[in-house]
Image (cartoon, rainbow, N blue to C red):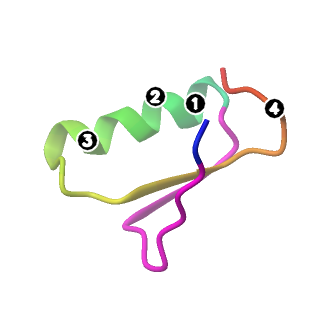
Amino acid sequence: MSIILSENPDVVLIGAGIMSATFGATPQGYSSALDIVMFESLHDCA
């Protein structure tokens, strides 16, 4: 897994559970130009 951090993301998701994963996929359907950042403290995502 690579870690790339953006200084000014459009969307910030806290936690990589099913709710964040679903919500994170939704804005991409509207605009693929959105910069989405997800923060998770565990080693893996949902």
Gap in angstroms between the C-alphas marked 2 and 1: 5 Å
The residue indicated by pointer 2 is 22
Asked whether disc 2 touches disc 1, contact meaning CB atoms under 8 Å apart, the reply is yes
Gap in angstroms between the C-alphas marked 2 and 4: 19 Å
Looking at numbered disc 2 in the image, what kind of residue is underneath it?
Answer: Thr
Number of other residues with Cα within 10 Å of mark 1, as a class: few under 14, some 14 to 19, many 20 or more = few
Query: Dividing the image into 4 quarters, which one contains the C terminus?
Result: top right
Earlier-in-chain disc, 2 versus 4: 2
Earlier-in-chain disc, 1 versus 3: 1
Could you say which quadrant of the image residue 8 lies in?
bottom left
Could you say which quadrant of the image residue 18 lies in?
top right
Question: Would you say 2 lies left or right of 41 here?
Answer: left
Looking at numbered disc 3 in the image, what kind of residue is underneath it?
Answer: Gln
What residue span does the magenta drawing correspond to? 3-16
Residue 43, disc: 4
Judge depth for marks 1 and 3 and give the one in front: 3
Looking at numbered disc 1 in the image, what kind of residue is underneath it?
Answer: Met
Judge depth for marks 3 and 2 and give the one in front: 3
The residue indicated by pointer 3 is 28
Number of other residues with Cα within 10 Å of mark 3, as a class: few under 14, some 14 to 19, many 20 or more = few
Judge depth for marks 1 and 4 and give the one in front: 4
Write the residue at 81% across / 32% down: 43
Viewer-proximal residue among 39 and 17: 39
Looking at numbered disc 4 in the image, what kind of residue is underneath it?
Answer: His
Number of other residues with Cα within 10 Å of mark 2, as a class: few under 14, some 14 to 19, many 20 or more = few
Gap in angstroms between the C-alphas marked 3 and 4: 24 Å
Question: Where is residue 17 drawn, in percent x and y?
Answer: 67, 29
Residue 19, disc: 1
Viewer-proximal residue among 33 and 3: 3
Q: Is residue 7 magenta?
A: yes
Write the residue at 15% across / 44% down: 30
